[in-house]
Amino acid sequence: MMLPMVLIVSYGLGFAGLSPQVRSESTVMSAVTIDRLAEIEKAIDAAWRARQPAGEMVWSLARTPYFASERWPTPSTTWTSYLAAYGTSVKDGLRDGQHVAEPWARITYDNGARTFALILIGDRLVDSRQIQGVRPLAAPDVALLKREPEFRQWVLTHPQWPVFNAELRGLQQFYATWMASNGVLAGLIAPRHEDFIKNWVSVIVG
């Protein structure tokens, strides 16, 4: 099976409004920088509009939390958030589940360089052919998931993590709850973050 070409949308550092450049990943991976998340969001919006196919499936954008490249994040850690999609078919009558598209882009944050990159994967949505079950969540879980923007900000502004404390306990519980509620998508990205998921998110600390 041929893998889709991986593309990078890159922006020159400090130039707001600069038109994005699309190049092959192998040629510019180390040089891609972006200094404003607002520019990332604009690029995501444009890429998402270009990937919504006409047809019986109605897709909604899905985004994962940032996942670390290693168990215990350090100042040199790379954080990655994935963009995927959840779909509802107007024909299959599925009421308690959603189709899940494979990740079509990822946002990376390099702790050491303090730079972001948006990496586009292919040029269309690809249905994973897996169904994510939908179930009612308990009130504490709903409240925890609503704090996702807060946790996103926290991991990107704390390059050196403290000894495990109450703050990290809440973060750990958030990741575990998100993965339990988004099992299919979590499974699609898990191989890239096995150390972080198995040896941090899933570890119970007394």
Image (cartoon, rainbow, N blue to C red):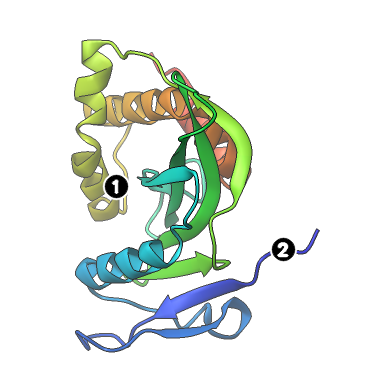
Q: Which residue is mark 2?
A: 3
84 up-or-down from 98: above or below: below
Which quarter of the picture shows residue 76? bottom left
Q: Tell which of 73 and 39 is nearer to you.
A: 39
Residue lying at the far right of the rendered structure: 1
Q: Quadrant of the C terminus?
A: top left
163 left or right of 4 in image: left
Going by the numbered disc 2, the residue's amino acid type is: Leu
- First in sequence, mark 1 or 2: give its number: 2
Considering the numbered disc 2 on the image, is that residue within a helix, a strand or a loop? loop
186 up-or-down from 31: above or below: above
18 up-or-down from 74: above or below: below
Q: Is residue 111 visible?
A: no
How many other residues sit within 10 Å of disc 1, few (<14), some (14-19) or many (≥20)? Answer: many
Tell me residue 109's x, y (percent): 37, 62
Considering the numbered disc 1 on the image, is that residue within a helix, a strand or a loop? helix
Going by the numbered disc 1, the residue's amino acid type is: Val
Which label number is shown at residue 79?
A: none
Q: Is residue 162 visible?
A: yes
Who's the residue at 42% across and 20% down the image?
Answer: 134
Which quarter of the picture shows residue 151? top left
Who's the residue at 61% across and 33% down the image?
Answer: 130
73 left or right of 153 in image: right
Q: Tell which of 125 and 151 is nearer to you.
A: 125
Q: Tell which of 42 and 158 is nearer to you.
A: 42
Tell me residue 59's x, y (percent): 42, 46
Q: Which residue is mark 1?
A: 155
